[in-house]
């Protein structure tokens, strides 16, 4: 059974629209993998340690690294939040905090 991927707000689409075409293709490939593969390798999807239920989708293209934060809802639904281009080894705290705020909003809104 395939997972469904949804976007919360405009955050992911804003990020995605800023990418060049080759990076967009790689993002689409990784999202398709997440939709279809039962056990997604950590190279592509990994939990953020210490942040309950928050995951990062990992996309690498050439020497650039991109991250998209997400969570699961109802087990099979992947909800995408913000994304960014990673410029250092450590994920910026501001990006994690933004993702946690969006996750909180998502689960506490009646529009779901």
Image (cartoon, rainbow, N blue to C red):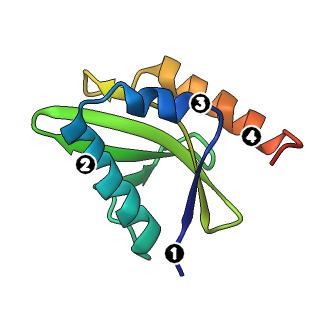
Number of residues whose C-alpha sits closer than 10 Å to that of mark 3, classed few (under 14), some (14–19) or many (20 or more): few
Camera sees residue 44:
no
* Disc 2 from disc 1: Cα separation: 19 Å
In the picture, residue 84 is in which quadrant? top left
Q: Residue at x 32, y 47 (%)?
A: 27
Number of residues whose C-alpha sits closer than 10 Å to that of mark 4, classed few (under 14), some (14–19) or many (20 or more): some
Q: Do the residues labelled 2 and 1 touch (CB within 8 Å)?
A: no
Q: Residue 58, relative to residue 92: is it above or below?
A: below
Camera sees residue 9:
yes
Nearer the N terminus, badge 2 or badge 3?
3
Q: Is mark 4 on a helix, strand or loop?
A: helix
* Disc 3 from disc 4: Cα separation: 13 Å
Q: In this view, does 84 lie to the left or right of 43?
A: right
In the picture, residue 98 is in which quadrant? top right
Q: How many marks?
A: 4
- On residue 106, which mark appears? 4
Nearer the N terminus, badge 1 or badge 4?
1
- On residue 26, which mark appears? 2
**Which residue is farthest right?**
110
Please state the horizontal and vertical placement of residue 78, each as a whole percent of the image: 57, 56
Camera-nearest label, 4 or 2:
2
* Disc 1 from disc 4: Cα separation: 22 Å
Q: Is mark 2 on a helix, strand or loop?
A: helix
Q: Is mark 1 on a helix, strand or loop?
A: loop
Q: What element carries label 3?
A: loop
Q: Residue 35, relative to residue 106: is it above or below?
A: below
Q: Residue at x 30, y 26 (%)?
A: 86
Please state the horizontal and vertical placement of residue 111, each as a whole percent of the image: 84, 43
Q: Residue at x 58, y 24 (%)?
A: 97
Nearer the N terminus, badge 2 or badge 1?
1
* Disc 4 from disc 2: Cα separation: 26 Å
Residue that mark 1 sits on = 2
């Amino acid at each position: 059974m395939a997972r469904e991927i949804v976007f919360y707000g405009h955050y992911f689409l804003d990020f995605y629209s800023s990418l060049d075409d080759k990076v967009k293709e790689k993002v689409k490939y990784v999202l398709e993998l997440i939709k279809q593969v039962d056990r997604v390798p950590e190279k592509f999807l990994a939990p953020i340690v210490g942040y309950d239920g928050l995951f990062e989708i990992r996309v690498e293209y050439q020497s650039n690294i991109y991250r998209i934060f997400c969570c699961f809802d109802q087990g099979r639904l992947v909800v995408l939040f913000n994304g960014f281009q990673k410029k250092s080894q450590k994920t910026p705290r501001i990006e994690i905090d933004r993702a946690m705020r969006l996750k909180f909003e998502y689960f506490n809104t009646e529009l779901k």
